[in-house]
Amino acid sequence: MPDPQSRTLTLDSRDEAVLLFGNRDQFLRLIRDALGVRLVARGDTVQIDGPEEAVGQTERVFQQLRSILRANGQITTEDVKTVLEVVRAGSERVGSQNLTMMDGGKYLRPRTDGQGRYVQALRENDVTICIGPAGTGKTFLAVGMAVTLLRQGAVKKIVLVRPAVEAGERLGFLPGDLVAKINPYLRPLLDALNDLIEFEQVKKYMENDVIEIVPLAYMRGRTLSNAVIILDEGQNASTAQMKMFLTRMGMNSKIIVTGDITQVDLPPTTKSGLIDAMHRLKGIPRLAIVQLDETDIVRHALVQQIVKAYEEGGHKRR
């Protein structure tokens, strides 16, 4: 029988504890029953007792729920159940959540609990908004979901959108056609596509309008059905632009918005539409808001430490 473990988790405040534990500790009971641990809550701490693996899973559950709480200001029963499902499944389940085959025969799959939550949200919702720092895979997994649905025949088109904030009115003076003008701004999306689909196939899809790349300003007046529409760097859309983008969705379509709210490049007087949407759109059915953090960074191991150092120093992520 595995040796019992005991760990104490200290929260930021009693207010956080109240929201995290739920009304009359209902969320604590859900976690306790699902993972078979003993939970003792005192003020802003919770003691976790049980087998080592279950205690570790419980810590991961609380970590994920705290991320959701920071993002949404509240936690629902459905949030707790979703996180429990992802964490209980462990690396075996998360690793089996294959999205699509990449170039070279490998499969794209979530690699952290947060990414597992994100993929589940993408599958279950028509609109998914994902906020997180660079390196958390939010753009790559969004493109992976789009490619999966295209290959399955569930949609007929992928539309990749990005604000060209730095270009402004100068976009028209850049050389080349529209694709060439906005290519620098859509490079991360195109890089993701080229990892998932052979270059020649991407080229054919673009020639046949199956894959379309377009600056955000060109989306006005359109309605897109049977499509996956991805807005990358959503923090650089204004509130009016975000409303315009989210209302482009036609029948049988999915919208995915990704962004990092610490990297807003808009003028100081312009409010970020992504930050506004995070607060305005809470609680709408089939619309998910997912928060990733530095624990979900899957680049070089040093990146997590670099992000944390800049956050502690009060600097924006770059």
Image: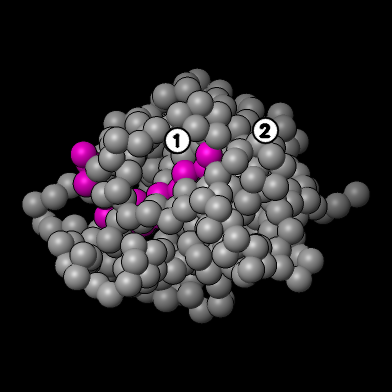
Task: Check residue 228 for magenta coloring.
Answer: yes
User: In the image shown, does 147 or 137 lie closer to the viewer?
Assistant: 147
User: In the image shown, does 141 or 157 lie closer to the viewer?
Assistant: 157
Q: Could you tell which of marks 1 and 2 lies nearer the N-terminus?
A: 2
Residue pictured at 74% horizontal, 51% vertical: 98
Please identify the quarter of the rendering in which residue 82 is found. top right
Nearer to us of marks 1 and 2 is: 1
Residue segment shown in magenta: 227-240
From what the image shows, is residue 32 above or below residue 12? above
Q: For residue 176, which numbered disc appears in the image? A: none
Task: Check residue 117 for magenta coloring.
Answer: no
Residue 238 shows in the view: yes
The answer to whether residue 121 is left or right of residue 255 is right
From the image, tell me which residue sits under label 2.
32
Q: Amino acid at mark 2?
A: Arg
Q: Position of residue 25 (x, y in %)?
A: 53, 25
From the image, tell me which residue sits under label 1.
224
Residue 80 shows in the view: no
From what the image shows, is residue 251 above or below residue 292? above
Q: Amino acid at mark 1?
A: Leu
